Amino acid sequence: MTRKLLFLCNLAAMALAPMAAAAEDTDMQTTTTLRIYDEVVFYDGYNDYVFDAGLDDGILRHRNSLYAIKLTDEQMDAFGDHTDMNITIGALCDNYDRIGNINIAFVPKGRESYVAESDPLSDNSDPTVQRVEIGRFITPFMNMNKDPKSVPYSYTLDNLGLLMHDTNMRARYDYWLEFELFGIPYAANEQIAGCANRNDVFTGTLEFVTTTPAAEANTTDVFIPIKMKLPEYNGHYNLNNYRETATDELGKTIKSYYFTIDQDIADGMLCLITSNHGANSGGEEYNRRDHYVYIDDELVLTYKPGRTSCEPFRKYNTQTNGIYGYFKRDDEAWQSFSNWCPGDVIDNRFIRMGAVSQGTHKVTISVPDAVFNGGQGDIPVSLYFQGVTEGALPEMSGINEPTMDAAIDFAVSNGIVTFATTDATALGIELRDVTGRLLDAQWATGISSYDASAQPKGVYLLNVILDNGYTVTHKFAN
């Protein structure tokens, strides 16, 4: 496997142009818009009665928080080499920040329904159906009586063109596009005018804007679902340190996932989606932690979730809440507690792997500083692999982690690590063992070295925290 060590990138998702009309010529490029869901209404996620289940609108309603539509051949055939996915959430009678996501379910061909259950402990789980998450977002605190009454989210997913035209996958599976959005109306029933005794929580619209002509059919795409997150209310397989099903070792926030490739891959990547949840006192939502990702026990990515600022999303948070107060916060205040912003996307992190050999591979995610105060909260993890047997994958936007060498140069001599930065100033360092456990920290503006000679002989990670929002990780032996 060919790959480079990667580092944290705290960049907002790329802003996209407004939603394009079908067959519109934009900047000399023609696009087609595929609207899959059009202001569909979601209801109380805890209510066992599925509202609108009897509607003849082509939507399979698994539950009030999870809907599915089978994509037609014509829709899949329309995907081009560049695709933007656009979501719009409308305010109804849930005035809190909730998690939502878009998934693809791969269902054996010909079924008119399927079980959308990724929980191995459930009696209803169907191992013949595999699901992947392709986009996650957090709703703002919205009062349906105040403007703006909706919030947009956008993603660039150029890899979908390969998947939609994968003749091997399409011969085996129908693709069902899932819209998942969990909400509850109970607070709004009391707090929002017009919401008394109502069960509707949000509206959702989903469309893809893709280039034409369509991409060509291919037999080179290799797509492997690895891990699908579970809803927070049923998250015993999401990552934490207090459930046996959620960690490799109780007391540690570390989990390994495995996938098998039956042929050599010319160019491969992982797509990883994580977000930290736990709104209790001292909960993980409010504590930014370093996340470490390993492939086959080699560190490939270090990142710390969270934006530089959540102020750009203030306008969508029209309901008074404890996150957005009456006054603006500076960047330092936002970075002191916010893992994500209500009204923002959760990043897709595309980890480029280069050539990947046939066989079984391991992906390990470690968050060594996570506490999960009171045995509450979790980190929903979604993960899939995509590769091509010849040629190269498209360059992916969103969070496409740059290589370490582009930002900083390291040298190690007699246990002393020196480093030089070119476009930023170092603010401090953290020394960690190979599992990510913190051993030492030093904070000084302009710091350029660390003496690890007194440490026991072994392999260590040195995090260099820069003033531009980046954290660079260097693996070394003393």
Image (tube, helix red, strand yellow):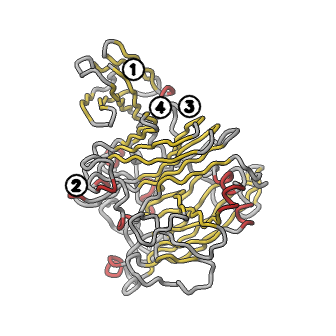
Q: Nearer the viewer, residue 182 or 146?
A: 182
Mark 1 and mark 2 in contact? Answer it, CB < 8 Å.
no
Give me the C-alpha separation between circle 3 and circle 1: 25 Å
The image shows residue 172, relative to residue 330, as above or below, that is below
Q: Tell me the amino acid under the disc marked 2.
A: Asn
Q: Amino acid at mark 3?
A: Thr
Say if residue 152 shows up in the picture: no
Q: Quadrant of the C terminus?
A: top left
Give the residue pinned by disc 1.
419
Q: Which mark is residue 2?
A: 3
Residue appearing at x 46%, y 68% in the figure? 125
Of badges 1 and 2, nearer the viewer stands 2
**Cβ–Cβ below 8 Å for labels 1 and 4?**
no
Tell us which disc is closer to us: 1 or 4: 4
Q: CA distance from mark 3 to mark 2?
A: 39 Å
Q: Earlier in the sequence, mark 3 or mark 2?
A: 3
Q: Looking at the image, is mark 3 or mark 4 nearer the viewer? A: 3
Looking at marks 3 and 1 on the same chain, the residue that comes earlier in the sequence is marked by 3
Can residue 53 be seen at all in this image of the molecule? yes
> For the residues marked 4 and 2, what is the alpha-carbon distance in whole angstroms?
32 Å
- Reading the image, the residue beneath label 2 is 373
117 to the left or right of 85 = left
Q: CA–CA distance between discs 1 and 2? A: 36 Å
Quadrant of image for the N terminus:
top right
Task: Identify residue type, mark 4.
Answer: Leu
